[in-house]
Amino acid sequence: MIVRRIVSLLLALLLCAGLVLPAGAETQYPSFQGIVTDLAGVLGEDTVQDLSLLAERMSDASLSLGSFYVVTRHFLGGTDAAVYAKALFEAWDLGWQDVLLLMVIGEEKYALYVGDGVKAALSADTQTSLLATHFRSAFLNRKYDEAVADLAVQTVQTIAKAGGTSVNTAGLFGTAAVSATHQPTAQSLTNAWESMFAFQDFEEDDDWPLDIQYSNYSGFNWRGWLIWGLLIYFVFFRKKKSYNFGHGPRGRR
C-alpha cells in the first residue's frame, strides 16, 4: 500500500513537471546578440547595420548616451510583452541609459523598456506617444524596417534633446546625408549679386609666384556688367512697337 502511494506520488510529480516544462521553456530568454537580436528574421541587413552605426554615434565621447536595442520574436506563449521586455532587459543586464524595443511578430505585440537614466526624458506618456506616432502603423502593416527606423531615430533624438544635445542621424535608414534642395538665404543671394557685378578681390598668397597669381586674377567682371547693360537697354532705350487691332488707320488725331 505504501509502495503504491509512493509510486502514485512520483507519477503525479512527473506529470506536473511535464505540464510545466513546455511553458517554462517558452519563456526562456534568448542569448544576447548585440544591438539587434532578430530571432523572427524580419529585419533587413541595412537596418541592422544602421542600428549599429546609430549606437556608435550615441556612444560618442561628447554624448555618452546609451544604446537602442531591438529584439524580435515570433511568440511569447501568452507572456505579457511589457513584462517580458522588462525581464529581458534585466536578464541581459542592460545599462541605465539603454532602451529596449521588443517586437512579437506572430502576436502583433510590442513593448518598450527604458533604463532609469532616461525615464525622465522618456516618461510613460512620451513612450506611448512615440509608439503611436512613429511605430504602430508601420508595424501593423508589416513594414518592420520602417517602423524600427522611425522609432529609433525619434526616441534617440528625444533623449538627446532632453540633455541639450542631438545625435547625428544623417545617412542612416535611407536618409540623405545632405538635403538635396534648400531655399536660398539672404547671404547666398548677396554673394550671387556680388559675383555678377562686383570687382573680384585679389589677395597675395605667399605659396604661389606673383605672375601666376595675377594670371588667375580676372579683375573687372565684364559678364555681370554686360547683363546689366542689356537689361537697361531693353527696359529704357528699346523702341516699343505699337500695334493696330482693327480700330482704323493709325495716325495722329
Image (cartoon, rainbow, N blue to C red):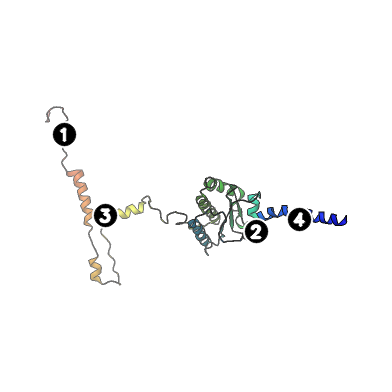
Circle 1 residues within 10 Å: few <14, some 14–19, many ≥20: few
Identify the residue shown where x is 30% and y is 54%. Answer: 192
Which residue is disc 1 drawn over?
243
Q: Which residue is mark 4?
A: 14
- Between the C-alphas of marks 4 and 2, the distance is 31 Å
Q: Nearer the viewer, mark 4 or mark 2?
A: 4
Residue bearing mark 2: 90
Sooner in the amino-acid sequence: mark 1 or mark 4: 4
Residue 109 in the image, given as x and y percentages of width and height: 60, 48
Which residue is tagged 3?
196
Q: Outermost residue toward the right?
A: 1
Mark 4 and mark 3: span between their CA atoms? 92 Å
Q: Is residue 203 left or right of residue 130?
A: left
Query: Looking at the image, do the residues carrying marks 1 and 3 touch, with CB atoms under 8 Å apart?
Result: no
Among the two numbered marks 2 and 1 on one chain, the one whose residue lies closer to the N terminus = 2
**As drawn, is 243 to the left or to the right of 191?**
left
- Type of the residue with mark 1: Tyr
Of the image marks 1 and 3, the number of the one nearer the N terminus: 3
User: What SS does tag 1 mark?
Assistant: loop
